[in-house]
Image (cartoon, rainbow, N blue to C red):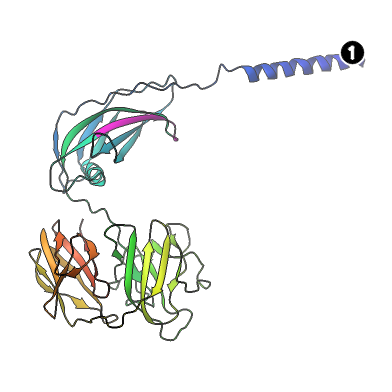
Amino acid sequence: MKYLKNISILMLTVCLFVLVSSCDDDSDKFVANETSPVQLSELTISEIELDPVNTNNPAVTFNWSRADYGQPAAVRYNVEISFDADFTNTVIATTISGNNTATLSVGELNSAAGSVGAPAFDWSTIYARITSSLGTQDGLPVDSNSISFMVYPYFNYPFDDYYLVGNGTAPGWNNNDNNPALFRDSDNPSLYYYTAYFSNDDGDYGNGRWKVLEERGLWQPQWGVTDDEGSDDPKTSGEIAGNPGTQGSDPGRFGVAASGYYEFTFNISTKKYTTEAYDASGATEFTSMSIQGAASETTAMTQSTFDAHIWNIPSIRLVPGELQFLTNTGSTWGSSTAFSGVAQEGGSIPVVVEDDYEVWFNTLSGRYIMIPLNL
């Protein structure tokens, strides 16, 4: 027995030695070295005019040398586009793994050019480079040389639009009944306003309610409050939730406890909202409203029967130029910002691209929004 015990101790010692030796053996460790910058080839063409009709056609192909990180690992390549040679404002147009060539479609290049600030319908110089890296965490990133070329983008509408639905608003719970659009802030495209009348005449807990939709006729995506329906007490501020934006189930409802004028703000970036009472006493209620100017024939707007301060045109053809809102008193209202802003007496609103537009104007706040229907 003592002999067998000694053999067991010897075998245990050998196993421990092998284990320790294997822990110290670093021959199989993955060690990658930073690669030299890949070389991005110059394009065979210097000017690219983008066709808004054939957006899926190839627009440009980039080729570059392969990165060498000293290991047989898949390398990720980001194709970066910038409006300046220092790449202070860039967008990743596409990401390629393992290959050293990438083709952007007309739509992809137009979107990238618009995102970095290249104006529509004008020639601009934009810059491209390749950033190589390892793994999904972009380890050991190295930038290539940069190249430049001219591009002529078509218009890229970069904004999101939102619409009201609910028994506290004009369309009720009908999600496709000319639902009012929220008015987007011209300086902060994530911030929206709706300063208007909300209804809850009987004070019932289920009345005076609304949600926010991204598209008329569809219940998702929809936005509301983080509280579950039934526990969603009307509040003056709070967090917003969305299906599917933040969760898989429908959110609770925004709401007011009594009828009146309120200013509702909705920030899709911070996921915050406010609903505060608004003093509309003394505000002028116009009896007619029209659009006029070089961008359009003079066209009458329709006044909401739910709120006399809300006017709209569901669809009107506008061309590049300027327009004003013309009141029954003969005064004209406008502003210097396209698509959305706050109108003041005497201004003119620029129209930068031809399209059919949905137009909303709020005479209580002066806010307007013009939503292109085909861009």
Q: Is mark 1 on a helix, strand or loop?
A: helix
In the rendered view of the protein, which quadrant contains the C terminus? Answer: bottom left
Q: Where residue 149 sits in the image (x, y, percent)? A: 17, 34
Q: In the image, is residue 177 above or below residue 218?
A: below
Q: Is 135 a magenta residue?
A: yes
Give neighbour class at mark 1: few <14, some 14-19, many 20+ (Cα, 10 Å): few
Q: In the image, is residue 30 above or below residue 179?
A: above
In percent of the image, x 78 and y 18: which residue is there? 12
Specify the segment rendered in magenta.
Answer: 128-137
Foreground residue among 81 and 341 = 341
Foreground residue among 63 and 82 = 82
Q: In which quarter of the image is residue 142?
A: top left
Q: Where residue 281 sits in the image (x, y, percent)? A: 31, 83
In percent of the image, x 30 and y 41: which residue is there? 91
Q: Main secondary structure of the magenta part?
A: strand
Q: Is residue 77 visible to us here?
A: yes
Q: Quadrant of residue 84?
A: top left
Say which amino acid is labelled 1: Tyr
Q: Quadrant of residue 302?
A: bottom left
Q: Is residue 220 visible to us here?
A: no
